[in-house]
Image (spheres, helix red, strand yellow):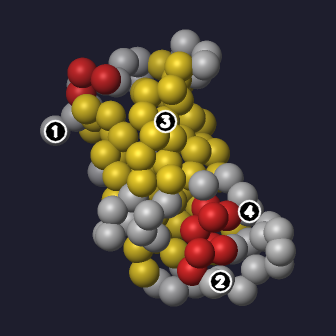
Amino acid sequence: MSGLSTHILDLTSGQPAAEVTVRLLSLTAPGVSIVSTATDADGRARLAAADQLAEGRYRIEFEIGAYFRRTGANTADPGFLECVAIEFHVQDATRHYHVPLLVSPFGYSTYRGS
């Protein structure tokens, strides 16, 4: 299976982050928004099918501030993180790309998943 997917884990609760708005944008073709969706109950979202992904630069934007406000996380008002953006390269569009986000109200981490 090729394409692009993501998964968000809330490190404060140890649970998947459901209903987080996620956007995928092309940076190779600036201003081109590929998809805007929300994570499912397991914190996952499929962002692009194989035919929607080409070699180039992309940005995933996670609207994490709204998620932490909705879940009542112990954050200041306004919270520290509002939108987490991850920019990356797709070098081989025939392969699957998975970009997970591990997040807390005050920090995050990501990696190239499988």
Q: Residue at x 36, y 18 (%)?
A: 54
Res. 97 visible in picture: no
Marks 1 & 2, CB-CB < 8 Å contact: no
Q: Mark 2 highlights which residue?
A: 73
Return the x and y of residue 2 as percentages of the image width and height.
22, 34
Q: Residue at x 49, y 60 (%)?
A: 20
Q: Which mark is residue 1?
A: 1
Return the x and y of residue 111 as percentages of the image width and height.
49, 53
Say what secondary structure mark 4 lies in: loop
**How many neighbours does mark 4 have within 10 angstroms: few (below 14), some (14-19), or many (20 or more)?**
some
Q: Residue at x 58, y 68 (%)?
A: 67
Q: Nearer the viewer, mark 1 or mark 2?
A: 2
Q: Tell me the distance, in whole angstroms, between the alpha carbons under discs 1 and 2.
A: 35 Å
Say what secondary structure mark 3 lies in: strand
Tell me which numbered mark, 1 or 2, is placed earlier along the sequence.
Answer: 1
Residue found at the very far top of the displayed protein: 29
Residue placed most toward the observer, 95 or 26: 26
Would residue 76 be found to the left or right of residue 101 on screen?
Answer: right
The amino acid type of the residue labelled 2 equals Ala
- Quadrant location of residue 50? top left
Marks 2 & 4, CB-CB < 8 Å contact: no
Q: Which mark is residue 97?
A: none
The amino acid type of the residue labelled 1 equals Met
Q: Tell me the distance, in whole angstroms, between the alpha carbons under discs 4 and 1.
A: 33 Å
Residue found at the very far left of the displayed protein: 1
**How many neighbours does mark 1 have within 10 angstroms: few (below 14), some (14-19), or many (20 or more)?**
few
Q: Which mark is residue 81?
A: 4
In the displayed structure, 34 sits above or below 108; it is: above
